[in-house]
Image (spheres, rainbow, N blue to C red):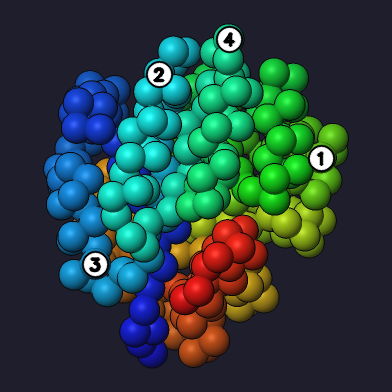
Amino acid sequence: MALPDKIIDFHVHLFPDRMFDAVWKSFVNNYKWDVLYKMYHPECIEYLHEKGVETIVYSNYAHREGIAEGLNEWNLGILNKFDGLYCFAAYHPGDRNALEIAEKVLSHPRVLGIKLQLLVQRFYPHDERLFPLYEMVMDKGKYLLMHAGTGPVGNEYVGLDHMRKLLKRYPELPAIVAHMGAYEYKGFMDMLDENPKLYLDTAFAFFREFVGKGGYDQGKEALERYQKRILYGSDFPNLIMPRESEIETLLNYNMSDAFYENVFFENGKEFIKRTVSDYER
């Protein structure tokens, strides 16, 4: 089995340099995690292209009130500087002008939607302050990228029950759940049957070092069944284990050729084509 010649990475993090430094420092202070790839955004983009990633979909998030607007100005500048780059932009419901910020950034053709990092941002996915954002995202044909599961660490704001509560209100919410919904893999995969606009991404869930210790645990059959609803993502550069480790794990499953074509390229291509009207790849 082999990867397709072209890869779309749907879960990359890009931040301004000082924010990257702060994120990496917080990983050490809070979790004793030492990031392997301490690269700023130009190096990240160059490195991934060298590794066969044709298209990069990155995100960042506002960990507190008052920074989403500046972060999104940075996002717009990066998108206008680099080709083959797409973004899930920042949002914080506590900002006075939150919807105005979202309206502006979502108007860029290569902004695919909004990133919500519920663990770090510390609000629930069913927080009523988010409802106007969800409706705006749906009206514009965009998506949400949501860190909604309990892995690699959890708190009271994440988990399957919270996502179920949200989808009860918005049963066709267009969303990508990061990390395959770790650690509640089965529950989040079951949601794919209930919500036609839900996707999962692979980031973090397939590290070889986590097999049997919290990594993906639902076997080959489920992966094959949902191969059109899974997007490859690396979590680069915020990795504490080698990027290749997850790819090797997925290759060692010996899935069908269609699985690798879909997960590593075709699903991403169709997703972007559907969300960005002038996508021509």
Of badges 1 and 2, the one in the foreground is 2
Mark 3 = which residue?
Answer: 49
Label 3: few (<14), some or many (≥20) within 10 Å? some
Mark 2 residue crowding within 10 angstroms, few (<14) / some (14–19) / many (20+) = some
Regarding mark 2 in the picture, which secondary structure is present there?
Answer: loop
Choose between 152 and 114: the one closer to the eye: 114
Compared to residue 219, the image places residue 106 above or below, namely above
State the image coordinates of residue 218 (x, y, percent, origin top left). Answer: 58, 64
Q: Earlier in the sequence, mark 1 or mark 2?
A: 2
Seen at 15% across and 45% down, the residue is 39
Of tags 3 and 1, the one toward the viewer is 3
Residue 149 x/y as whole percent? 56, 40
The quadrant holding residue 22 is top left
Residue to which mark 4 is pinned? 96
> Spatial distance from mark 1 to mark 2, Cα to Cα?
28 Å
Q: Is tag 4's residue or tag 2's residue first in the polypeptide sequence?
A: 2
Element type where label 3 sits in the image: helix
First in residue order: circle 2 vs circle 3: 3
Q: What residue sits 70% from the left and 50% below the top?
A: 141
> Disc 2 and disc 3: Cα gap in Å?
29 Å
What is the x, y in percent for residue 167?
78, 40
Quick one: SS at disc 1? loop
Q: Provide residue 3's location: percent of width, then percent of height.
A: 37, 82
| Alpha-carbon span between mark 4 and mark 2 | 12 Å
Q: Is residue 137 left or right of residue 273?
A: right
For the question of whether residue 63 can be seen, the reply is no
Disc number at residue 170? 1
Disc 4 marks a residue whose amino acid type is Arg
According to the picture, the residue beneath numbered tag 2 turns out to be: 67
Q: Earlier in the sequence, mark 4 or mark 1?
A: 4
